[in-house]
Image (cartoon, rainbow, N blue to C red):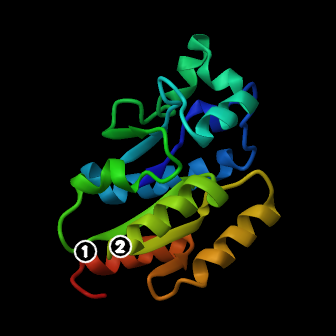
Amino acid sequence: MVVDLQPAFSHPGSAWYTPAVAQAAQRIAALVPLFGERVVFTRFVPPARPEGSWSRYYDKWSFACDPTADWLWEVDDPWKGRLSVASHTFSKWAAARHLFGPEVNVVLCGVSTDCCVLATALAAIDEGAHVRVVADACAAKSPRIHEDSLSLMALRAPLITIVDSDEEKRRHCQSEQGTS
């Protein structure tokens, strides 16, 4: 799963711009071909009508509900045409769960490590999925927030495993050769 790789986080003109997305996207670009059509991209989208605590959230971030901001919610190039699911919640697990089989192994990367990646990872393990988070293919507003978030997820081991993109590539090659 590639979480929320979209202009809302990658475009410098967005209030939610996350500078480290560019480096994470390069690593994601190297990982996506390994998984082929099994890759699911997720998109954070504002709800049509914010309710509950989301009302106050969008009072703070009103730009997100402006119809002229629709371009922020597409998947970034070059993956615009790929399979994607949208959700107005931080966790994308409920939106994507139906795409996975009963024995679920999920590799997560994307943005933001401290929000949507973290929420998705926790929701997935709650439902019994095995989750690997590719640390250097994730991004947050600052290196410290990124590292703190990875540390929190690492506390959930062995339910969540933190790897880097090189390790994930090795794992993938080994599984393709029939060894783990």
Q: Which residue appears at 29% of the width and 56% of the height?
A: 97
Q: Which residue appears at 34% of the width and 30% of the height?
A: 81
Residue 25 or 161: which is nearer the viewer? 161
Disc 2 residue type (three-letter): His
Q: Hey, which quadrant is residue 123 in on the image? A: bottom left
Residue 153 or 88: which is nearer the viewer? 88
Report the residue marked by disc 1. 176
Residue 148 or 167: which is nearer the viewer? 148
- Proximity of marks 1 and 2: CB atoms separated by less than 8 Å: yes
**Location of residue 88 in the rendering, given as x and y in whole percent from the top left corner:** 48, 38
Which of the numbered marks, if any, corresponds to residue 87? none
As drawn, 165 above or below 56: below
**Location of residue 124 in the rendering, given as x and y in whole percent from the top left corner:** 39, 67
Q: Of helix, strand and loop, which one carries label 2?
A: helix
Q: Residues within 10 Å of mark 2 (few under 14, many from 20)?
A: some
Count of numbered badges drawn on the protein:
2
Q: CA distance from mark 1 to mark 2?
A: 6 Å
Which of the numbered marks, if any, corresponds to residue 172? 2
As drawn, 108 above or below 40: below
Please indicate whether residue 98 sits to the left or right of residue 147 in the image: left
Q: Which residue appears at 51% of the width and 87% of the height?
A: 157
As drawn, 17 above or below 110: above
Res. 84 in view: yes
**Location of residue 50 in the rendering, given as x and y in whole percent from the top left corner:** 54, 30
**Location of residue 76 in the rendering, given as x and y in whole percent from the top left corner:** 51, 33
